[in-house]
Image: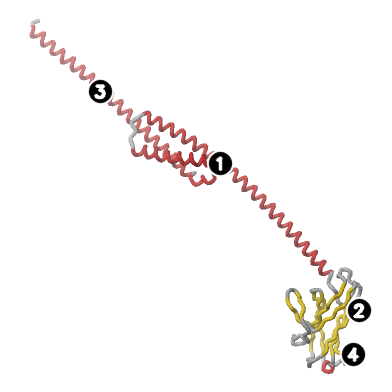
């Protein structure tokens, strides 16, 4: 083989070797690039997945935002606020920045695990407080029911005591029997014709009553004519918070025994018309008698 042929063979071999080396270099470079692309695609997918997890976590924080008022632990509220702020910042990072490090992806996963743990602790606190509040509400409801029952019992007892007190008070009232209104002459005898009468005589009996306190009793007499006008007017007395004018009065000593033939006279000082006259008697802040009488001319 001459020198020219040898040179040709060397050249061809060199070209082939160079081509093989170049092909291998290209394949190696292509493999490296493909691996990088696959890694970037993996990172992008993981970033999208993390963004979704942070979005869900952020939503959970917002759902419990209005329930922080049930938490009495200030430290927990502070940690909750810090965690919520961190979630929002990390979510902004995931949405606006491209992550090119597996290390950063791992850090973000660890952050999610920590924040989820805090969320579980926070939810447990809220559930516990809600159960406690529910128990307190039930207890308060039972206490209110007991108080209403007790209040009703007190009200019924008070009403019974008032009724008993009223009965006792009424039992102390003076009674009157045989009440009469008579027109009389100047000699004290009965006058049939009203226009000739000189006085009006009111007579009655106070029966025995052991419940009535003994002592002097002032009896106030009111006589009203058919027109409703009061006859006479010798002063007034207090009755049920008002000042009541009276026709005349009489004071007697009451010992608890019957007091017969009590009389009160009123001297006629004006012309009286025939018709219905009303006689009322008052004593010890009670109206003890009220009756109408027909007087004719």
Count residues near mark 1 (Cα–Cα under 10 Å), then give few for <14, some for 14-19, many for 20+.
few
Real-space CA distance between mark 2 and mark 3, rounded to the nearest whole angstrom: 141 Å
Q: Residue at x 37, y 34 (%)?
A: 47
Real-space CA distance between mark 1 and mark 2, rounded to the nearest whole angstrom: 84 Å
Give above or below for 201 relative to 85.
below
Q: Which residue is mark 1?
A: 127
Give above or below for 120 relative to 195.
above
Describe the colour scheme in one phrase. secondary structure
Q: Nearer the viewer, residue 29 or 109?
A: 109
Image position, residue 55 (x, y; %): 41, 40
Real-space CA distance between mark 4 and mark 2, rounded to the nearest whole angstrom: 18 Å
Q: Which residue is mark 2?
A: 260
- Depth check, mark 4 against mark 1: the one in front is 4
Q: Secondary structure at mark 3?
A: helix
Q: Which residue is mark 3?
A: 29
Question: Is 89 on the left-hand or right-hand side of 167?
Answer: left
Q: Which residue is mark 4?
A: 188
Q: Are marks 4 and 3 in contact (CB under 8 Å)?
A: no
């Amino acid at each position: 083989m001459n020198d020219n042929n040898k040179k040709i063979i060397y050249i061809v071999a060199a070209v082939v070797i160079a081509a093989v080396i170049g092909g291998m270099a290209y394949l190696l470079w292509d493999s490296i690039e493909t691996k990088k692309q696959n890694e970037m695609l993996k990172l992008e997918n993981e970033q999208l997945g993390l963004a979704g997890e942070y979005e869900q976590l952020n939503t959970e924080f917002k759902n419990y935002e209005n329930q922080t008022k049930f938490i009495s632990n200030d430290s927990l509220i502070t940690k909750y606020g810090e965690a919520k702020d961190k979630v929002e910042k990390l979510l902004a990072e995931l949405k606006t920045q491209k992550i090119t490090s597996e290390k950063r992806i791992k850090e973000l996963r660890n952050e999610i695990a920590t924040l989820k743990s805090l969320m579980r602790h926070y939810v447990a606190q809220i559930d516990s407080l809600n159960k406690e509040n529910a128990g307190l509400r039930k207890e308060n409801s039972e206490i209110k029911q007991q108080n209403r029952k007790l209040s009703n019992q007190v009200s019924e007892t008070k009403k019974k005591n008032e009724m008993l007190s009223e009965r006792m008070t009424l039992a102390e009232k003076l009674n009157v029997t045989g009440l009469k209104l008579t027109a009389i002459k100047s000699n004290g005898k009965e006058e049939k014709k009203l226009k000739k009468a000189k006085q009006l005589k009111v007579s009655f009996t106070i029966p025995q009553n052991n419940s009535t306190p003994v002592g002097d009793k002032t009896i106030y007499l009111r006589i009203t004519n058919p027109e409703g006008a009061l006859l006479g007017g010798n002063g007034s007395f207090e009755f049920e918070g008002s000042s009541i004018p009276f026709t005349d009065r009489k004071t007697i000593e009451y010992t608890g025994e019957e007091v017969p033939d009590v009389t009160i006279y009123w001297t006629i000082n004006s012309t009286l018309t025939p018709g219905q006259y009303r006689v009322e008697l008052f004593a010890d802040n009670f109206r003890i008698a009220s009756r109408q009488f027909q007087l004719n001319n």
